């Protein structure tokens, strides 16, 4: 599988789950624990989703380490474009308001989850290579 195809598939699968879960988070969690608390609850679920999706794709398509790394980075670019071009438009939130609405803790956790998303295919590919 070519690198852009792998990256797009990885992005689309994780984004689709995140989109659905984001709706549930907004409707069910935010009224109970607030926006920051809901995002902190969402993060381990999304990292687990990222791990499962990346694992399935890496095991199925077995990219080389370099391709796995660049696929994750390209998928991150797709994710950021989608997040800032699509999600913010749907929610009607300007980027500045979106950024300022996040607590320093939730913003840090979000940044770390983006790094995990970008590096997950590479990390799993290295683990799969060692195990075989």
Image: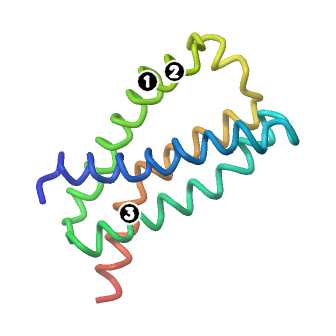
Q: Nearer the viewer, mark 2 or mark 1?
A: 2
Q: Is residue 65 above or below residue 98?
A: below
Q: Using the image, tell me which numbered label, if any, was put on residue 22.
A: none
Q: Nearer the viewer, residue 23 or 117?
A: 23
Q: CA distance from mark 1 to mark 3?
A: 23 Å
Sequence order check, earlier mark of 1 and 3: 3
Q: Using the image, tell me which numbered label, if any, was put on residue 90.
A: 2
Element assignment for label 2: helix
- Residue 56: x %, y % from top left: 35, 71
- Residue 87: x %, y % from top left: 50, 26
Give left or right: position of 39 versus 80.
Answer: right
- Name, please, the residue furthest toward the bottom: 132
Element assignment for label 1: helix
- Residue 4: x %, y % from top left: 18, 45
* Residue in the image at 58% along x and 45% along y: 112
* Residue in the image at 40% along x and 65% along y: 123
Q: For mark 2, does the 10 Å Cα neighbourhood hold few (<14), some (14 to 19), or many (20 or more) residues?
A: few
* Residue in the image at 35% along x and 34% along y: 77
Q: Is residue 128 above or below residue 91?
A: below
Badge 2 vs badge 1, beta-carbon distance below 8 Å: yes
Q: Using the image, tell me which numbered label, if any, was put on residue 86.
A: 1
Element assignment for label 3: helix
Q: Nearer the viewer, residue 92 or 85?
A: 92
Sequence order check, earlier mark of 3 and 2: 3
- Residue 1: x %, y % from top left: 12, 60
Q: Using the image, tell me which numbered label, if any, was put on residue 54.
A: 3
């Amino acid at each position: 599988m070519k690198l852009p195809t792998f990256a797009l598939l990885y992005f689309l699968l994780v984004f689709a789950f995140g989109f659905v879960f984001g709706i549930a988070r907004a409707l069910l969690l935010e009224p109970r624990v607030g926006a920051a608390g809901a995002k902190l609850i969402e993060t381990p679920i999304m990292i687990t989703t990222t791990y499962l999706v990346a694992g399935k794709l890496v095991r199925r398509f077995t990219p080389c380490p370099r391709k796995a790394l660049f696929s994750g980075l390209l998928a991150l670019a797709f994710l950021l474009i989608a997040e800032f071009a699509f999600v913010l438009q749907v929610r009607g939130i300007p980027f500045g308001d979106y950024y300022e609405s996040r607590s320093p803790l939730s913003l840090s956790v979000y940044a770390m989850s983006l790094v995990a998303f970008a590096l997950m295919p590479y990390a799993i590919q290295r683990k799969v290579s060692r195990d075989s």
